[in-house]
Image (spheres, rainbow, N blue to C red):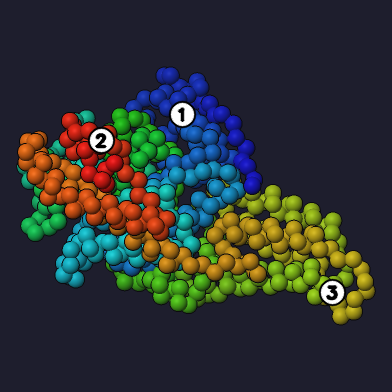
Amino acid sequence: MLQGAVGVVARRCSLGPGPGCGKVVARQCCSAARRREWVPPVGRDSGIVVYNSRSRTKESLVLAKDRVATWYSCGPTVYDHAHLGHACSYVRFDIIRRIMTKFFGIEVIMVMGITDIDDKIIKRASEMNMSPVALARIYEEDFKQDMAALKVLPPTVYMRVTENIPQIISFIETVIANGQAYATSQGNVYFDVKSWGKRYGVLTTVSSDTQDEAVNTDKRHVKDFALWKAAKPQELCWTSPWGKGRPGWHIECSTISSAVFGKQLDIHTGGIDLAFPHHENEIAQCEVYHQCEQWGNYFLHSGHLHVKGSQEKMSKSLKNYITVKDFLKKFSSDQFRMYCLRSRYSSAVEFSDKSMDDAKNLLQAISSFIKDANAYIKGQLISDPVREDILWERLANTKVTVKAAFADDFDTSRAVAAIMDLIHHGNRQLKAVTKDAGSPRSSVVYGSIISYIEGFFNALGMSFGERQVALRADNSTVLSNVIDELVQFRTKVRHYALVLPEAAETAQQLMQDRRPLLEACDSLRENLAAFGIHIKVRSCHLLAHLLNPKMKCGQLPHDLR
Ligand SMILES: Nc1ncnc2c1ncn2[C@@H]1O[C@H](COP(=O)(O)OP(=O)(O)OP(=O)(O)O)[C@@H](O)[C@H]1O
Ligand SMILES: [Zn+2]
């Protein structure tokens, strides 16, 4: 594994002279008025330079904890099949994640939020005459399957919005208590953008200074955005201090990220369309909630995938999309990955048959080189003598170029070009001849080249040659999600069965009534254990307390011991 240069980073404020500036800094050196400037975090330099949308320039990626990156990724809104635009964004970030892990030794802890309640979900569900939650579950599962088919590594955890409503409500309460949001008589809660002032507009140049009174709405100002939306009649909703309703879009990600990582977040990613307003609003909310100066140190945005000749991104609403499933009927995930590798993650890309042909041809060239080199090593391909010294040097240079390209904002196209150049030289030396002159074979250098090239592509989520692994990801992902659902269902049933009233007599009776539920949970746990699935039960003391603060462990139902 190649390791990036690391060192403790204690930096000078980049803002130049000013009160308190110019010395070795933590973040607080800059006045609020100039706060839109990004301040390098204190931590360890990863050895990678990234384009940071927060500072709008390339910066050294400094991680708060040595070789550990906390990463929040905005996930999909699950109301339809994923298309190639989504695939492009998630595959590109998957490549980045793999580069960080495999080439720079960084452990990535990634959280992805799943938007499983929103206007589009509600609309589609009503068209299909089903509940929004059921619809969302179907497309969430579908998304996970598509990602597995594209060999995108799952995040460390997926977090659904609907499973974090109490956390979202309490987050909003804090933003209100900190004076930056207001509830209206109609049961909506808005972020007060105007009074956030110059702090608004971190990622894009937008002004909060609008005099406009909002029309036909209960907002104070046009730019104010919803943290909580009052429910329309018949809509799925949750009870809140502001009445029945549901969360706004931006608050979901702020809450979920904060619930897992607190106020420390190294990397935040999403497609470029999310920079404004979504990420801008997430930043505002989190900085109010955490009362901090800089939430989210690095914002990385992927460029859009366009259909050739179109200015518009591939999108469901524009109906100009190809679903991942349809695409994979014609092409392989390796071919799509190669298509993605050929441009930098942040640039816009055109999708066309020609671009897929180019990706296919490159893969073909790599495969045929690996085949030839293998044949040469085995003595099935006879060649004139090889200049080994040149090849060893080429190989060493390629490794240096690849590492440098990756360290430069994950320049995958330069890295692939370096590999293709190595292949070009490898091929040039393999001059097939019909007559074996008995000269010694240069097996080791070709073996090393193959091993490096295969290692390179495997590290990026692809596979080549004889060692190609048949993926059975689809089934295993479905199974693992089914298990998740089952375990969650069991947890809910147990929690329900364990909540008892204070009055001892009623509690005893209810405990008797609910015993079958707990026994069923118990036997499910035992039965799953037979398949190697172990559900951990919470400690006896905690459960004892839940059940009845006075009850002793031995008195607990079987499942709780
Ligand atoms: N054409 C595209 N190219 C690249 N990334 C895209 C494209 N379309 C969506 N994304 C990204 O996919 C991720 C999930 O997006 P989301 O589920 O919100 O889809 P969406 O933007 O609603 O899609 P659509 O516009 O098709 O309705 C986001 O990070 C978004 O930026
Ligand atoms: Zn988000």
> Which residue position holds label 2?
553
Amino acid type, label 2: Cys
Q: Give the residue displayed 64% in from the left and 45% down from the top.
A: 2
Please identify the quarter of the rendering in which residue 448 is found. Answer: bottom right
Q: Give the residue displayed 18% in from the left and 38% down from the top.
A: 547
Looking at the rendered structure, the secondary structure element under dot 3 is: loop
Q: Give the residue displayed 43% in from the left and 58% down from the top.
A: 90
Please identify the quarter of the rendering in which residue 543 is found. Answer: top left
- Give the mark nearest the N terminus, 3 or 1: 1
Circle nearer the viewer, 2 or 3: 2
- CA distance for labels 3 and 1: 63 Å
Drawn side of residue 561 relative to residue 443, left or right: left
- CA distance for labels 2 and 1: 61 Å
Between 218 and 256, the residue placed more toward the observer is: 256
User: Label 3 near label 2: C-beta < 8 Å?
Assistant: no
Q: Is mark 1 within 8 Å of ligand 2?
A: no
Q: Give the residue displayed 56% in from the left and 57% down from the top.
A: 460
> Which residue position holds label 1?
15
Neighbours of disc 2 within 10 Å: few (<14), some (14-19), many (20+): some
Amino acid type, label 3: Ile
Question: Percent position (x, y) of residue 475?
Answer: 42, 67
Amino acid type, label 1: Leu
Circle nearer the viewer, 3 or 1: 3
Question: Percent position (x, y) of residue 301?
Answer: 43, 51
Drawn side of residue 285 relative to residue 68, left or right: left
Drawn side of residue 496 relative to residue 409, left or right: left
Q: Quadrant of the C terminus?
A: top left
The number of discs equals: 3
- Give the mark nearest the N terminus, 2 or 3: 3
Between 304 and 197, the residue placed more toward the observer is: 304
Vertical order, 97 against 57 (above or below): below
> Which residue position holds label 3?
382
